[in-house]
């Protein structure tokens, strides 16, 4: 019984430290190791010839690594550039650039990894046991830009799926795509009274135009709202009316079966 979830982008997002082997980060020793010339040499050797027992995110193609989350003023000039481009600006090779940037930013560097195949994304989108998810938090451009660039999945996952892959490329029916985004997820996670338009269920409703729905966020300009969504209700309360936020915030924590089970009295304790 296997399921998985995906987002409709051919790039992942995590920290820049994902290019460093796990043993070099263990026990909070990353910074100590990066300051030690002998350890730097050992880590470099691993990056140049990975052992094969970890992802080695940058070793196959360092140009696929794009740091976006710099905090320090002197490093913001590198935002959105590939690590190979950054290294050239710093007169370093890509490995030395990674080491020094991790130390400079204290490992707080969000990074995009163009490590996926568009062909594989399309294939995954059609598999019945794969659901659609964002793998990200939500942002509002009104305040989100202050955080710097983010993965566009935060803004565009569902509109991109419905616009690009359903309407434009027709690799999946609208009904099947909606199912992957709603009921199949709620059912798998054991979320009661969610994921279906049904009497007695919580009214979580999105009204959109299939002809216009689509994502606008990109890897270069991430803080862009999607288009084509007209109205949204959460827990029966309207939060989007005619494309504008109403100011309502009726969201709540949704308990799964684990939380419900933990809340039940144990035998002999009631």
Image (tube, rainbow, N blue to C red):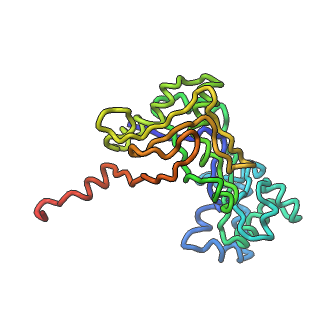
Left or right: 228 as drawn, with respect to 249? right
Q: Does residue 255 appear left or right of residue 45 in this picture? A: left
Task: Return the x and y of residue 69 as percentages of the image width and height.
Answer: 69, 61
Q: Is residue 256 above or below residue 3?
A: below
For the C terminus, the quadrant is bottom left
Q: Is residue 144 above or below residue 229?
A: below
**Residue drawn 38% across the image and 36% down it:** 1
On the rendered structure, is 27 left or right of 188? right
The residue lying toward the viewer, choosing from 205 and 237, is 237
Residue 116 image position (x, y, % from top left): 66, 41
Specify the quadrant of the image occupied by residue 91.
Answer: bottom right
Residue shown at 61% from the left, 53% from the top: 140
User: Taking 34 as reference, is 209 left or right?
Assistant: left
In the image, what residue occupies the spot 55% across and 48% down? 245
Q: Is residue 78 above or below residue 1?
A: below
Q: How many marks?
A: 0
Closer to the camera, 127 or 261? 261
31 lies above or below 116: below
Residue 86 position by quadrant: bottom right
Residue with the most extreme left position: 268
Q: Position of residue 240 (x, y in %)?
A: 52, 44
| Nearer to the camera, 232 or 70 | 232
- Quadrant in the rendering for residue 182: top left
Q: Write the residue at 56% across / 52% down.
A: 138
């Amino acid at each position: 019984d296997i399921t998985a979830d995906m987002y409709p982008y051919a790039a992942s997002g995590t920290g820049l430290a994902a290019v460093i082997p796990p043993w070099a980060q263990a026990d909070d020793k990353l910074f100590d190791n990066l300051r030690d010339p002998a350890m730097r040499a050992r880590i470099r050797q691993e990056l140049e010839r990975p052992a094969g027992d970890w992802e080695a995110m940058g070793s196959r193609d360092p140009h696929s690594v794009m740091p976006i989350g710099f905090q320090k003023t002197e490093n913001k000039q590198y935002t959105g550039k590939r690590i190979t481009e950054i290294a050239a600006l710093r007169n370093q090779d890509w490995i030395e650039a990674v080491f020094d940037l991790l130390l400079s930013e204290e490992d707080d560097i969000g990074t995009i990894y163009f490590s996926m195949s568009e062909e594989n994304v399309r294939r995954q989108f059609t598999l019945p046991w794969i659901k659609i998810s964002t793998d990200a938090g939500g942002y509002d451009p009104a305040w989100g830009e202050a955080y710097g660039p983010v993965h566009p999945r935060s803004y565009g996952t569902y509109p991109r799926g419905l616009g690009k892959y359903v309407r434009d490329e027709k690799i999946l029916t609208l009904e099947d795509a909606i199912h992957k985004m709603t009921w199949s997820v709620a059912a798998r996670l054991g979320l009661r009274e969610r994921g279906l338009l049904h009497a007695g269920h919580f009214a979580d409703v999105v009204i959109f135009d299939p002809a216009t729905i689509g994502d606008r966020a990109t890897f270069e300009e991430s803080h862009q709202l999607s288009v084509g969504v007209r109205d949204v209700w959460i827990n029966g309360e309207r939060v989007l009316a005619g494309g504008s936020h109403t100011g309502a915030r009726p969201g709540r924590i949704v308990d799964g079966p684990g939380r419900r089970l933990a809340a039940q009295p144990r035998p002999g304790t009631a």
